[in-house]
Image (cartoon, rainbow, N blue to C red):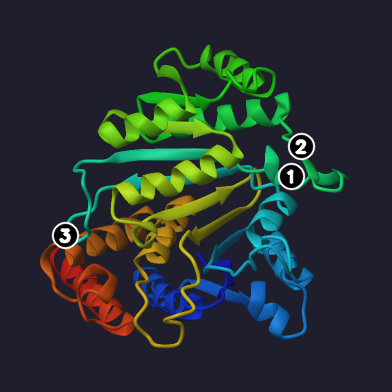
């Protein structure tokens, strides 16, 4: 079976790490994916296009699956985040970030972290509804609806059931925003009634921050709103070595975009030294999503083996390897594992 996949090549180091990912995916799928490259972000703007061209959206609408390199968002000027716009335009309402301690050289303070952060992707303060009330006073609206809250809860409980998760922690700050976060909690309680075999707890956001520092291994799944999820998912990535080792997915009812969640690293762009592991692991999530479980397992096994057994690592992991050398080593490990099996 062949698959058409939209490929956002990205800005900065994006083209380098996506090229590495394509090599790995083509290898484990025997070239059955037809890649459709599209531009977005600063690369699109430099080509005289909008930050999120219609051609990119049309490709995703047609193919339903995309994988995306990092995109640049100017700070405080320019254009609104392409990532946010893409999620809202395609109604990619669930952000999924698996966070797992990987073997090898990543510097971490914790062992055996294995949790999933699920974030509501379309509402909250990220609707971008803000205005100047009077000079010097800005008002931003936090939008929370029953429909979106129930939807993310249903997605989260289904994800837990289908992936062997046992406990969900619903994160909120209802002591400060009792109406909006109160609605979020009500929807969690309503949906939880259909899943009596899953354990559910609620936790204030600040308490979660403290407990993650104390012992992140006590958590299984974290479910939270948009802004809270944006911040806490990056914090969780830091527990296992940083954004360069953590994949991400944005999922809707008909479309899904898989992405590296790190930045564009303009200081090393074009040097061929970027770490492609995050987007390679995002490709693993994509492969599972389209039913290519054997290929996905081959990718993840090779990444773990590379980190544990070899010294072919990029400099952010303490090595000296280039992006190409690390990718070549992953391909070698995949072939060795296939021969052994």
Q: CA distance from mark 1 to mark 2?
A: 8 Å
Q: Position of residue 94 (x, y in %)?
A: 58, 42
Q: On the rendered structure, is 141 left or right of 335?
A: right
Label whose residue precedes the other's in the sequence (1 or 2): 1
Give the mark nearest the N terminus, 3 or 1: 3
Say if mark 3 contacts mark 1, CB within 8 Å: no
The reply to whether callout 1 and callout 2 are in contact (CB within 8 Å) is yes
Mark positioned earlier in the residue sequence (2 or 3):
3
The residue lying at 59 percent from left, 14 percent from top is 190
Is 278 displayed left or right of 78 in the figure?
left
Q: Residue at x 44, y 39 (%)?
A: 117
Q: Secondary structure at mark 1?
A: helix
CA–CA distance between discs 3 and 1?
A: 40 Å
* Residue indicated by mark 1: 127
- In whole angstroms, how far apart are the C-alphas of marks 2 and 3? 44 Å
Q: Secondary structure at mark 3?
A: loop
Residue 4 point in image, percent of width and height: 58, 68
Which dot marks residue 104?
3
Residue drawn at 69 percent across, 78 percent down: 44
Please state which of residues 284 and 105 is positioned toward the viewer in this rendering. Answer: 105
Query: Which residue appears farthest toward the front when viewing the image?
Result: 136
Contact, CB < 8 Å: mark 2 with mark 3? no
Instruction: Give the residue pinned by disc 2.
Output: 141
**In this view, 172 is above or below 115:** above
> What x and y, as percent, mark residue 270?
45, 87
Q: From this viewpoint, is residue 220 visible?
A: no
Q: Quadrant of residue 181?
A: top right
């Amino acid at each position: 079976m062949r698959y058409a996949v939209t490929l956002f090549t990205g800005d900065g180091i994006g083209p380098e790490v996506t090229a590495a990912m394509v090599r790995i995916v083509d290898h484990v799928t025997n070239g059955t994916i037809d890649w459709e490259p599209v531009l977005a972000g600063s690369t699109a703007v430099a080509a005289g296009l909008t930050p999120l061209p219609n051609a990119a959206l049309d490709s995703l609408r047609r193919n339903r699956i995309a994988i995306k390199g990092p995109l640049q968002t100017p700070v405080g000027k320019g254009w609104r985040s392409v990532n946010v716009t893409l999620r809202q335009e395609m109604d990619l309402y669930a952000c999924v970030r698996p966070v797992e301690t990987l073997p090898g050289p990543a510097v971490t303070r914790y062992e055996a972290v294995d949790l999933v952060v699920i974030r509501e992707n379309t509402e909250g303060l990220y609707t971008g509804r803000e205005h100047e009330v009077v000079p010097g006073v800005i008002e931003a609206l936090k939008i929370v609806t029953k429909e979106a809250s129930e939807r993310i809860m249903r997605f989260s409980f289904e994800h837990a059931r289908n992936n062997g998760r046992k406990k969900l922690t619903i994160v909120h700050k209802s002591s400060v925003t009792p109406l909006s976060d109160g609605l979020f909690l009500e929807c969690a309680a309503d949906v939880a009634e259909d899943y009596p075999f899953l354990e559910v707890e609620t936790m204030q956001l600040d308490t979660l921050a403290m407990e993650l520092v104390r012992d992140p291994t006590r958590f299984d799944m974290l479910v939270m709103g948009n802004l809270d999820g944006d911040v806490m998912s990056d914090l969780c990535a830091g527990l296992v070595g940083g954004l360069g080792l953590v994949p991400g997915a944005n999922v809707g009812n008909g479309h899904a975009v898989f992405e590296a969640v790190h930045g564009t690293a303009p200081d090393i762009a074009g040097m061929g030294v970027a770490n492609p592991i995050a987007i390679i692991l995002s490709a693993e999530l994509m492969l599972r999503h389209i039913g290519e479980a054997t290929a996905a397992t081959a990718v993840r096994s090779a990444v773990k083996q590379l980190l544990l057994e070899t010294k072919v690592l990029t400099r952010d992991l303490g090595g000296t390897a280039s992006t190409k050398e690390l990718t070549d080593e992953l391909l070698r490990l995949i072939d060795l594992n296939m021969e052994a099996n």
